[in-house]
Image (tube, rainbow, N blue to C red):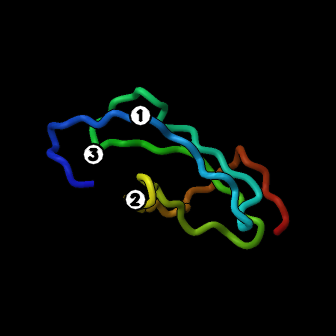
Amino acid sequence: MSRPANKRIEVTEAEAQPLDGHLRAAFLGLPKAAEEADPRDLLLRGWVLPKKGPALAVELLCGESVIGRALVDRPREDIPEHPG
């Protein structure tokens, strides 16, 4: 995202997209609507559970545009493993 560092952003809506044929389950925890954040510190939390193989990354969309991508590289002991 390109915006001056002193400008805060307001989250007006945040939703996970419907599961496609590749995901068994997913969850988007943050941000919540009406929250404000420094664009340098925008925190997203959630998880994905693919139907096959490991998930490699998730994408952040604004409308139809991909504006961010995050690697899925942290173990989640709170989510049980499922056979692929």
Q: Is residue 45 left or right of residue 35?
A: right
**Image location (x, y in percent) of residue 59:** 49, 60
Q: Which residue is mark 1?
A: 12
At label 3, which amino acid type do we have? Arg
Residue under the point 55% across and 42% down: 15
Numbered badge on residue 40: 3
User: Splitting the image into 4 quarters, where does residue 1 fall?
Assistant: bottom left
> Is there CB contact under 8 Å for labels 2 and 1?
no
Secondary structure under badge 1?
loop
Q: Which residue is mark 2?
A: 68
Report the Cα–Cα distance between label 1 and label 3.
Answer: 17 Å
Secondary structure under badge 2?
strand
Comparing labels 2 and 3, the label whose residue is closer to the camera? 2
The residue at the far top in this view is 34
Residue under the point 57% across and 69% down: 56
**Image location (x, y in percent) of residue 9:** 29, 37
Viewer-nearest residue: 82 or 60:
60
The residue at the far bottom in this view is 53
Give above or below for 54 relative to 1.
below
Quadrant containing the C terminus is: bottom right
At label 2, which amino acid type do we have? Gly
Query: Mark 1: few, some, or many residues within 10 Å (few <14, many ≥20)?
Result: few
Q: Mark 2 vs mark 1: which is more N-terminal?
A: 1
Report the Cα–Cα distance between label 2 and label 3.
Answer: 12 Å
User: Splitting the image into 4 quarters, where does residue 24 fall?
Assistant: bottom right
